[in-house]
Image: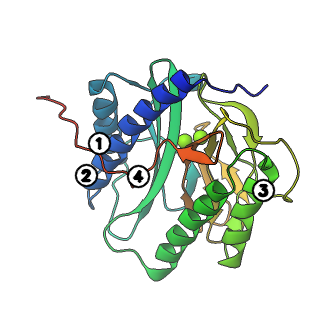
Amino acid sequence: MIYKKSGEEIALMRRGGAILVDTLNRLEEALLPGITTGELDAIAERSITAQGAKPSFKGYRGFPASICTSPNHVIVHGIPGPVMLEEGDIVSLDVGVLYGGMHVDSAWTFPVGQVDPAKAALLKASEAALEGAIARCRPGARLGDVGHAVEVVAEAAGFSVVREYVGHGVGRSLHEDPQIPNYGPPGRREVLGAGMTLAIEPMINAGGAATRALDDGWTVVTADGAPSAHFEHTVAILTEGHEVLTSRTHARPPVALGAS
Ligand code: MG
Ligand code: MG
């Protein structure tokens, strides 16, 4: 069942989204060659908790960290730890924030230093695929329109779309109905309506679409070892159009966290 949110609930998610974006900005600033994914996790946890929120992922089905860190051929759900990021890597940082009882969810794949043109093209196309999907979000559109937009943009750029992992409703829980595949025909599935809040999250592979889950129970990698990118926004459907609750482009004053 799809929960439509009240204006008050969306306002809480907007505030949580600002905390999430502030956290992603801090991570981007810290993301220099030599940093470990565990260090990034610590920065994120401190940023989220110091702003009166909780990391949605910590303890979720036993997940041991506050964010997911997925470098290079890791698609999603990488566990932060001693892995050191190097010049030329890419890394997806996936952040969930629980604020005022409401969750928001957003991910961004960043270059570490200078990356080669193939990785840069993958990042550009994957972000464009997310933007294309969000552009379809308005009352009366169909969920199939959203996934189809991802597929069209990613495949036109010569990349492949992960099929086993999908976007989702978000808000009162981290994962709610509906599931949001990043592929499929337009004009099908649920009709979008005001108050729906959706985590749209294309996962785009430079090589084939096939995935493989590692023995740690979380990490998902590309079967062929080629790089993968992941971009995610939480989007509210409004009476007219939509609002990206985790937009990274809004000007925001930095939040002072105080002494550690
Ligand atoms: Mg996420
Ligand atoms: Mg998500």
244 vs 160, left or right, is: left
Is 60 positioned to the left or the right of 20 in the image? right
Q: Where is residue 78 shown, x and y percent of the image?
A: 51, 45
Label 2 vs label 4, nearer the camera: 4
Viewer-side residue, 53 vs 17: 17
Query: Is the Cβ of the residue at disc 1 closer than 8 Å to that at disc 3?
Result: no
Discs 2/3, front: 3
Residue 224, given in percent of the width and then of the height, sits at 66, 66
Number of numbered discs overlaid on the protein picture: 4
If you read the primary sequence from the N terminus, does the residue marked by circle 4 or circle 3 appear first?
Answer: 3
| Disc 1 from disc 3: Cα separation | 39 Å
- Report the amino acid beneath label 3: Asp
Residue that extends furthest to the top in the rendered view of this protein: 101
- Is disc 3's CB within 8 Å of ligand 2? no
In the displayed structure, 195 sits above or below 163; it is: above
Is 132 on the left or on the right of 188, as rendered?
left
The residue shown at (78%, 48%) is 143
Circles 2 and 3, Cβ within 8 Å, touching? The answer is no
Indicate the amino acid at tag 2: Ala
In the image, residue 18 above or below residue 258: below
Q: Earlier in the sequence, mark 2 or mark 4?
A: 2
Give the structural element (helix, strand or loop) at label 2: helix
Q: Are marks 1 and 2 in contact (CB under 8 Å)?
A: yes
Q: Which mark is residue 145?
A: 3
Q: Residue 30 got which mark?
A: 2
The CA span between labels 1 and 2 is: 9 Å
Q: Which mark is residue 248?
A: 4
**Three-letter amino acid code at disc 1?**
Glu
Residue 70 in view in this figure: no
Residue 97 occupies quadrant:
top left
> What kind of element bears circle 1?
helix
Q: Residue furthest front?
A: 240
